[in-house]
Image (spheres, helix red, strand yellow):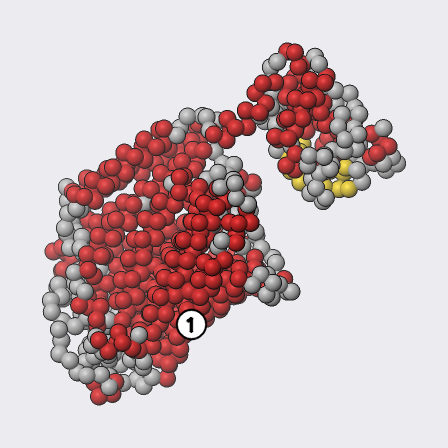
Amino acid sequence: MSQHDNQRPEPQRTPLKESAFEPYEVNRPIPVLVLAVTVALVAWGVYTLWADSGPSTEAAAEAEAPVAGIDSDPAIADNPSALVSAGSTIFAANCATCHQANGSGISEAVPPLVGSRYVNGSAETPVQILLHGIKGRIEVAGNSYDGRMPRFGETLTDQEIAAVVSYIRQQWGNSAAFVEPAFVAQQRDRFAADRGPWNGGAELEQVTGVPARLARATDTEASQ
Amino acid sequence: MSLTIGSMMALSFVVSLIALAFLIWAVASRQFRMDQGDAELIFPGGEGGDHQPDDPTSFGFREKAEPGEGTDTRHRMLLFALIGFGTFWLVFGSIFGVIASLKLNIPDWLSGSAPMTFGRVRTVHLNTVIYGWLSLAGIAVAMFIIPRIFKTHLRGVNFGWAGLVLWNIGVAAGAWAIATGWTDGMEWLEIPRPIDIILAAGGACFAIPLVMTALKRNVHHIYVTGWYYLAALVWFPVLFVLGNLPMHSGVQQATVNWWFAHNVLGLWLTPIGVGAAYYILPKIIGKPIYSYRLSLLGFWALALFYSQVGMHHLIGGPVPTWVVTLSVVQSVMMFVPVIAVAVNQHVLWATNLWAFKQSLPLRFVAFGAVMYTLASFQGSMEAVRAINTVTHFTHYTVGHAHLGAYAFVSLVLFGTVYYMMPILTGRLWPAPKLISLHFWLVAIGFGIYFISLTIGGWLQGLAMLDASRDWLESMQLTQPYLRGRTLGGTLMTLGHAIFAINLVSLLFASRREATPAATGAPATTAG
């Protein structure tokens, strides 16, 4: 550092007054090169916005892929075991991240599916939760949760929802009846698609009759 | 559905383009009547020829306060207080930055107490340097330059004092809140909302004197620095209030979060730095800026394109594709204002290299101006999906953030403070060598820091993309680069300590005109 200072004149120099010079700008034209770059960037920007304006995206295509084969196959619709096996694929792709592959949920964050009275009770409850999503307080298996689940009404078809609900109702010791695509279609027509998520267990109770709080029976008893 | 909003946003891009085309046409066909003749009429003195650089490390200030130059005592005390507190937050924030960096080398260090865990230490660092140092020093610089270019004195100084008190309470309370774990939980918006109200009130108190001064200006033509500062005073309060409104949730919240966070850089810190450089470079060198028309292009292109830049942070996130695409396009369009500013500023100093030998503040400011160009080019490239795929979620982004906020804005502010303090105090910097030491410490420290994080971050990104490599490998390979980060950060922090020492030493410097004998410098003739 001192080497540098030795080579150049000392910055501390003859005393002067502050210069009277005030900064201003010369009125030179904008260089042609700058204008050329601007035009080129504008052209690129318009092209990029245009090329990217289509509805399809990589993410959407990827999400569709694993379930594409079963969304309208009539052979699956009437066959409970085919429905359940298709449901396992859909579950792995859409649900397992939060509810876990074994349906146990995450302590204090995501309710379990195993032994849940919402899953094992009347089929309309799980179907409605999938169609519209749910947020807010809900009690499952003796614990209270306060989270948010997105709706799948738009991303999954009736048959796919029937498949995944059938799957979770018959896995991990759950043993409720399987659900037909026609039943999902009927549930879908009950409420507007954009009605927003269910407001916790309280609103589910009004719609499906599953009590938000269980005073007498435990969850496990309710499911059996 | 999304088409409606999407086409509206695309429309905003089209409107920006039309406005830009109109501006270029207007400039080309001389719709703006203010030209060089007018400018010279307003700023007598003309183009500087052969003289010494206007460097207050090289001249003594006469005690007589010059009216219209913003030097009355209360105004000066306010500027000292702003710079003093700003410097306190700079040193405070830098120490937290180094602690955070050390924690990446020694993960278990200080992990016993919650306030000293990485998440909080790093956040305290960010908030104190952005809202404490850069904002306070930036306001001080604005309050120094605005009265000068408007040829009047600063109005409403009492508002400035109120702002100083409120703002410092806000930053201190914010740092305390973050350390105790009370935050809003969004990057750059961590300070809890009740404390944000104090900051908003403080910010308004800073804006009032500057706007009052602008309204009472004694010049017709507003110099380019004035555009940047007046615009920033409008932009930042809007950003800060909208960003903190508790009305967004989910994906919207993330979008608003990054809209805010990036605009703090582009529409608050950038105008502060660019505006200061636009004033200090020609002032020290004594020659005018290259082109008024380029200034117009640079300012308006920033205003038109910047506000939608931030959403490129959500590439790969669950936001509509068109939001991200629009943001990528706007980010790349930022080349336009940056090139305009670059031509304007770099032509000036590059054709006057002699001044570097004699002016210490010029080194800081010109270095910062170059870093603005580099940071913006790098930022535009980082927004492109192909590059973002590698750099997102890596240390590369951290290096880029410091290139912009530190190497550009901080360095320009250092230089400006070194320039203005002798004018305000009438005292000479007692130890110019310490200024030089400060420069080399932060320049070398930053170089080590930036190169380490850029290389390390890029390798980290490549490792994370390689599915055949374990994720942990992408962490382990960054270790040597993270040691470089700590080393660079420590050097910069030492530089900041020198900066603080320089400021304190000025308090004790004798108030007299410098004579060559008194400063021990050889009396050389003007070059």
Question: From this viewpoint, which residue is outermost toward the right?
Answer: A216
* Residue linked to disc 1: B494
Comparing B463 with B53, the one in front is B463
Query: What residue is rendered at 65% in x and 34% in y?
Result: A96
Residue A170 shows up from this direction: yes
Q: Position of residue A101 (x, y in %)?
A: 69, 34
Please say if B246 is above or below A170: below
Q: Position of residue B357 (x, y in %)?
A: 21, 71
B66 lies left or right of B132? left
Q: Position of residue B255 (x, y in %)?
A: 48, 42
Q: Position of residue B272 (x, y in %)?
A: 34, 58
Please say if A118 is above or below B233: above
Question: From this viewpoint, which residue is outermost toward the bottom?
Answer: B517
Quadrant of the image containing the C terminus of chain B: bottom left
Please say if B380 is above or below B512: above
Total tally of numbered discs in the picture: 1
Which image quadrant for residue B386?
A: top left
